[in-house]
Amino acid sequence: MTLSDLNRLLTGRHSCRAFRPNPVPQDQIEQILTSASRVPSWCNAQPWHVVVTSGVETDRFRAAMQTEAATGAPAPDLPFPTSYSGPYQERRRECGWSLYEAVGVERGDRAGSARQMMENFSLFGAPHCAILSSPAELGPYGAMDCGGFITAFSLAAQALGVATIPQAALATYSPFLRRYFEIPDDRIVLCAISFGYADKDHPANSFRTDRADLSQIVDWVG
Ligand SMILES: Cc1cc2nc3c(=O)[nH]c(=O)nc-3n(C[C@H](O)[C@H](O)[C@H](O)COP(=O)(O)O)c2cc1C
């Protein structure tokens, strides 16, 4: 294993926003989860827990999620960002515009962008969804550990040719997710990861995001 092998995985991965319906074999899902579990966590607490849906249960959840998004009130367990400013606002806009341009939504077309946003709740057609939660008592550090789990999940999936997208959008309706999947009250719902095989010809999968130059993210001391 060389750094270029790892970089191939890192740069080959992207957030998939259109999936084919074919299921991922159960043994491969288990391999992805086993690999993701190797990430470090504070005190090795391994705070992550996932509910993974497959088959008709994904479709049942998709339908219920769409209904909730159309009728329910937002109540994320983990407070959403209060604002994005400066470079964070610019990067957020840039990736939003890339997506909208790819799917043919013009700037200022609020109905079009809202329609594309609602695709989150159909899981972008994915055959599987993993709902990720962390013990409430671990607070932001549990969530931090789970961030590593999300990344490793995505990379392990990528190594098997399985596409992923982390989705905080679903956590907008955390109480619904907790009720629907009987997630205990002492856990907070962080996000979902929808996964499956990419529809490579779909316009929503036709763009890639950039990354800031090192000069923007590092202060060297010494
Ligand atoms: C924690 C987390 C939550 C995310 N939530 C969403 C989401 O709800 N909907 C969505 O379309 N993308 C979501 N994304 C994907 C990001 O938009 C994406 O990672 C970012 O634009 C970089 O693009 P890339 O993943 O293709 O490299 C999320 C990513 C992360 C890490």
Image: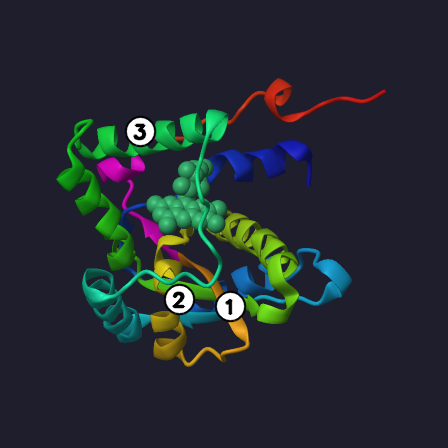
User: Dot 2 surroundings within 10 Å: few (below 14), some, or many (20 or more)?
Assistant: many
Front one among 139 and 46:
139
Q: Label 2, on which residue?
A: 174
| Amino acid at pointer 1 | Ile
Alpha carbon of mark 3 to alpha carbon of mark 2: how far?
28 Å
Tell me the element at label 2.
helix
**Mark 3, mark 1: which one is toward the viewer?**
1
Front one among 165 and 24:
165
Tell me the element at label 1.
strand
Which quadrant contains ligand 1? top left
Q: How many marks are shown on the rendered structure? A: 3
Disc 3 vs disc 2: Cβ atoms closer than 8 Å? no
Q: Label 3, on which residue?
A: 98
Q: Is residue 125 visible?
A: yes
Residue 202 x %, y %: 23, 40
Q: Label 1, on which residue?
A: 188
| Magenta segment includes 195 | yes
| Magenta segment includes 90 | no
| Amino acid at pointer 3 | Ser
**Mark 3, mark 2: which one is toward the viewer?**
2
Magenta region: 194-207
| Amino acid at pointer 2 | Ser
Alpha carbon of mark 3 to alpha carbon of mark 1: how far?
31 Å
- Residue appearing at x 29%, y 53% in the figure: 120
Alpha carbon of mark 1 to alpha carbon of mark 2: how far?
8 Å
Residue 104 x %, y %: 17, 31
Disc 1 vs disc 2: Cβ atoms closer than 8 Å? yes
- Lower sequence index among marks 1 and 2: 2
- Lower sequence index among marks 3 and 2: 3
| Above or below, comparing residue 95 to residue 142 in the picture | above
**Is 36 placed left or right of 162 in the picture?**
right
